[in-house]
Image (cartoon, helix red, strand yellow):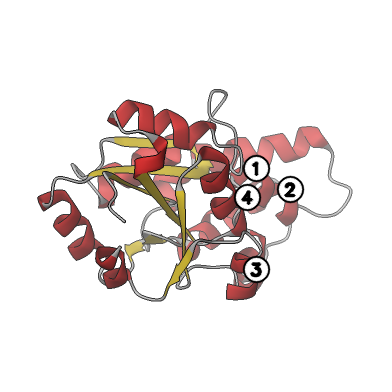
Amino acid sequence: MSFDAYLFDLDGTLLDTLPDLHALVNEALSRKGFPPRSYEEVHSFIGNGALALVWSCVPEGTSPKDVDEVYQLFCSLYEEFGMEKTRPFDGIMEVLGSLSAQGKKLGIISNKFDGGVKAVEERYLPGLFGCALGESPRVPRKPDPTGLLSCAKELGVEPGNCVYLGDSASDMRAAHNAGMYAVGVTWGYPSVEMLQEGDPDKLIDRPSEILDL
């Protein structure tokens, strides 16, 4: 196999963002007078985008209006509370540098809201990616393949020459839906059993294995 482009999920694949997501969602909940969620609860809720995370964290029976207000707080507070403890997973920066040196094109497609993707990319991954897309009106959440296909088009690469790496079953389904090679990373947030529900073409346990593709 040989790929011209390497496309990545963000949270749980490139970056360990869970500590900041926990702090951020609890800050948004607090400002609406809602009780906090534990680290373990937030861990179990992530993977389907910020709005889904907020719906999971608010008390049962919360009105859609109040959920939307918590979500808007979550987004507006992101740059203040959402990036302080975020870090690339060990070995990721070296792998990205090596791929870039080989002339491979790099992209990000995340279920995180688009503004958050742009902010965290600029802070932790500057100058490495030719395309970075998050959830927005024009990019539905994965497993919809729209974001992956849009990124491939922006990079000038056919979908069949792309590999998509992620830590969730929805990432794997999005890759299959886009006609891309699906690689599941086991260092992310869902369990390996949950990841395998997306039928990955390959599983890898360390970032260095990306270079073996």
- Quadrant (top left/top right/bottom left/bottom right) for the C terminus: bottom left
Kind of residue at badge 1: Leu
The reply to whether dot 3 and dot 1 touch (C-beta < 8 Å) is: no
Front label number (1 vs 4)? 4
Question: Which residue does the numbered mark 2 point to in the structure image?
Answer: 55
The reply to whether dot 1 and dot 4 touch (C-beta < 8 Å) is: no
Q: Which mark is residue 194?
A: 3
| Residue visible at 15% across and 58% down in the picture | 98
Element carrying mark 4: loop
Kind of residue at badge 4: Asn
| Residue visible at 19% across and 54% down in the picture | 99
Per the model, the C-alpha gap separating discs 1 and 4 is 8 Å
Kind of residue at badge 3: Met
Could you tell which of marks 3 and 1 lies nearer the N-terminus?
1
Per the model, the C-alpha gap separating discs 3 and 1 is 21 Å
* Left/right of residue 142 with respect to residue 164 in the rendered view: right
Give the image location of residue 23, x and y in percent. 52, 60
Give the image location of residue 73, x and y in percent. 58, 39
Q: Which mark is residue 51?
A: 1
Could you tell which of marks 4 and 3 lies nearer the N-terminus?
4
Question: Which residue does the numbered mark 4 point to in the structure image?
Answer: 48
